[in-house]
Image: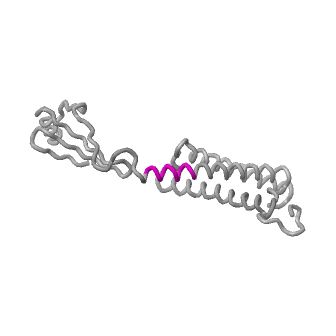
Amino acid sequence: MMISMQNRSALTVVTTFPDKPLKVLSSKSSSKSSASLRARQSGRRSSFSSSSFRIVRAAGAGGKGEEEKEENSVELYAGIAGLLSCAVVSYSLFTLKQTGCGLPAGPGGLVGAIEGVSYLGVAGLLGASAYKKTTTGSGLPAGPFALLGAAEGVAFLLLVAGLYVSVAHVLEYGYIPNAVPVEGGKCA
């Protein structure tokens, strides 16, 4: 924050934050505000009213910036992709629990490929969330329509469900199935 005095009756406060646009707060009131500022600078208490300030847009700081719009669209697409991946993984876990095998390969291996990419997407969500949690203390941002936050939450639920299905599979069948079906195996 920077405070500057332009003559004795005008005060300008410029604040900059890394994720917020530049704001210029300006007061052109009587010497009461100037006296109040001098009292604050010297450490004395005063009745300084913030209602005498007005917000003035700085040049180039109007509305949402391009970077913020781009970040929102990335969060939107990541949230949609994350939720779609979570849906495929949840169906795959359900199928694995019921049949002992994952999803079938499908025509040209397309279904199996989607399943594999979805598992990677959920793992990526979990990794990004864990990294963000350890570096900043909070998880992923909610994103537009809270889609990214929802995908993150569902991914953690799927982690628990995956552990349950793996333990149940080992107890029932004695092994964890391969990611790629083995020729002549149960899931081939």
142 vs 78, nearest the viewer: 78
The single residue placed furthest to the bottom in the displayed view is 183
Residue at 64% from the left image edge and 46% from the top image edge: 154
Relative to residue 58, is residue 29 depicted above or below?
above
Whole-percent x, y for residue 20 in the image: 36, 48
Q: Residue 49's quadrant in the figure? A: top left
Residue at 62% from the left image edge and 51% from the top image edge: 82
115 vs 163, nearest the viewer: 115
62 vs 160, nearest the viewer: 62
Whole-percent x, y for residue 50 in the image: 24, 33
Tell me which segment is drawn in magenta: 68-77
Q: What type of secondary structure mainly makes up the magenta span?
A: helix
Q: Is residue 67 left or right of residue 32?
A: right
Q: Residue 57's quadrant in the figure? A: top left
In magenta segment, residue 66 = no
Whole-percent x, y for residue 150 in the image: 60, 44
